[in-house]
Image (cartoon, coloured by chain):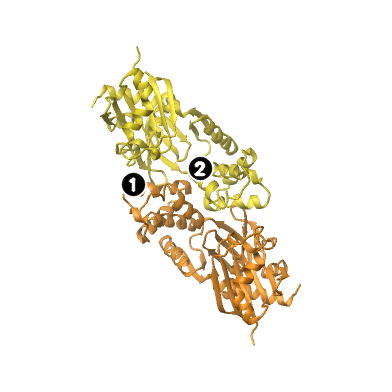
Chain colours: A orange, B yellow
């Protein structure tokens, strides 16, 4: 009989849990119960409520967590593992504790290091996806893009995370479309592939970002993009701009949800980039399963 | 006796008027009565109210306006003058009309063209400041930076505007400090020169903007910038990033308010750039006086 356990990605905005049987997910929960919605001191009770049905049925299952739950604003702060960073390094720095209802629990550390642009950088949760990617597709080198609110571009050598950089593409898109002069006072927006690709093409010219985005205003004034396609254009600009950081000819993985990786692949096609999509949940589950087996072998 | 007239810079947020005696300002009004606060169809009555005291005393003075008042959202739309663009081109495309109380009035057109980064670009109001700069400091070539919500970088050859590019530095700073994860949940912010210069230095590394800004989070997490200095750091980042577009060794003018040009000069010093500040109001008044004399010579 396979061991049951629970894999959790607990971020700033969202909570996602997988009931696992060995390496296979058998059930899942997704709730908008990220850190921002959890009151101080209420992490344990929130988690117990969210997992109630599984715990009731299967007892005090082991729980392995990753993401912002290990940050200063999270449940228990777990210091970052410095780069370069292997699965063993993450396991060695994982925090082990027991919940007040008796489940053995672990929180995986994030990772930190300097980006190739000489900026300090941090991640929490993506390190597990990267580990899963390296296990699912063994190779001596990986370049991986994890698109999102704060996209990550990472390099791995023999399964070791050697470097990464954060791009705030998703958040900047939200700011521009919701709060800037570019995105305001518009009719209801529609998904507009032409406008999206026009934004990607504009980003290819190498313009500085704070200049580039003004083209959403001027192209709208000039009638080159539809009033209903301005948000699509801004999406193309921000994704296209992010993809300028991927060297031409570089084979790279896109790790994320199918809808988001499809959007990035559309932009990548316009830019002549070779990006292979892989499901982010599969990577997360695989990485966390690997860590769980290591943690069980080294109970603290 | 010198002619009295009124010079107006009417923008999106602010309204500024100068009572002029020939080329000299003798009184001024500054009100937060930009386009956003004027109800549809109320431009004439708003203006009459704002100028009441001057009109009462001196009669139906001529009024020359520039800025967003000539945009689609303004009083009367005046089509842009295309680059390259001389004072004569602006005068020839200026809209002349008479207000309902009998003042002769003019609205100067903005200018449009492609930036050196191949993006369509527009300005309204800054073309008058550029013209004033070229009149106050005659030279065969000018490079000018007009910092602000939407900064402009312009090139002029023999007084002709040949190229310009907009950088949304001021607006991006507002978005990041007021609405992003970088600027939220902070103690009351203080002016912090060290944090500002640290932001400028970070921008010098050539990192893509959407990556660079994440350093406001990581440097705060690492204790490298004070919790009270995060907005100063973000200001240094956005200004430093904008100044990367100025070629090293290029002599350039900074046209603006003394407080804003001082801030840019502080950043420029850190980057080894040679920027000379000049008062933006002086340039505006001088440029508009020159256009007014041309318009009077060519009454329409």
Which numbered disc, 1 or 2, marks the residue closer to the eye?
A: 1
Say if B9 sits above or below A267 in the image: above
What is the spatial separation of the Cα atoms under label 1 and label 2, in whole angstroms? Answer: 24 Å
Quarter occupied by residue A166: bottom right
Q: Which mark is residue A221?
A: 1
Can residue B158 be spotted in the picture?
no
Residue at 71% in and 75% down? A102
Q: Which residue is mark 2?
A: B242
Instruction: Residue A237: give x, y in percent of width and height.
Output: 43, 54
Total labels: the figure holds 2
Q: Is residue A56 left or right of residue A218?
A: right
Q: Nearer the viewer, residue A249 or B3?
A: B3
Q: Is residue A143 left or right of residue B282?
A: right
Q: Residue furthest bottom?
A: A1
Quadrant containing the C terminus of chain B in the rendered view = top left
Instruction: Residue B222: give x, y in percent of width and height.
Output: 67, 52
Tell me which chain the residue with mark 1 is part of: A
Q: Residue furthest top?
A: B1
Quadrant containing the N terminus of chain B in the rendered view = top left
- Give SS at disc 2: helix
Say if A154 sits above or below B199 in the image: below
Tell me which chain the residue with mark 2 is part of: B
Q: Nearer the viewer, residue B47 or A240?
A: B47
Say if A180 sits above or below A284 in the image: above
Can residue A248 be spotted in the picture?
yes
Residue at 65% in and 72% down? A64
Residue at 52% in and 52% down? B210
- Give SS at disc 1: helix
Disc 1 crowd rating (10 Å Cα; few below 14, some 14-19, many 20+) is some
């Amino acid at each position: 009989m396979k061991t049951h356990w629970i894999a959790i990605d607990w971020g700033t905005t969202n909570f996602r849990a997988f009931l696992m049987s060995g390496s296979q997910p058998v059930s899942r929960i997704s709730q908008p119960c990220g850190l921002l919605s959890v009151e101080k001191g209420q992490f344990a009770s929130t988690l117990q409520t969210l997992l109630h049905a599984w715990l009731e049925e299967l007892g005090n299952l082991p729980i392995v967590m990753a993401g912002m739950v290990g940050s200063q604003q999270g449940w228990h702060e777990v210091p970052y593992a410095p780069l370069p960073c292997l699965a063993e390094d993450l396991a060695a720095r994982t925090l082990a504790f027991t919940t007040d209802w008796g489940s053995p629990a672990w929180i995986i550390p994030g990772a930190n290091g300097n980006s190739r642009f000489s900026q300090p950088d941090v991640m929490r949760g993506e390190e597990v996806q990267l580990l899963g990617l390296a296990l699912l597709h063994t190779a001596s080198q990986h370049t991986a893009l994890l698109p999102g609110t704060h996209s990550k571009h990472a390099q791995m050598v023999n399964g070791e995370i050697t470097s990464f950089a954060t791009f705030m593409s998703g958040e900047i898109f939200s700011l521009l479309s919701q709060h800037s002069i570019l995105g305001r006072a518009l009719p209801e927006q529609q998904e507009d592939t032409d406008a999206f690709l026009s934004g990607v093409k504009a980003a290819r010219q190498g313009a500085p970002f704070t200049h580039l985005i003004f083209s959403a205003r001027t192209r709208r004034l000039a009638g080159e993009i539809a009033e209903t396609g301005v948000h699509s254009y801004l999406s193309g600009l921000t994704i296209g701009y992010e993809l300028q950081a991927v060297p031409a000819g570089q084979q790279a993985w896109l790790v994320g949800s199918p809808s988001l990786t499809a959007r990035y692949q559309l932009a990548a096609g316009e830019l002549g980039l070779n990006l292979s999509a892989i499901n982010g949940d599969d990577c997360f589950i695989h990485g966390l399963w690997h860590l769980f087996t290591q943690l069980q072998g080294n109970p603290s």
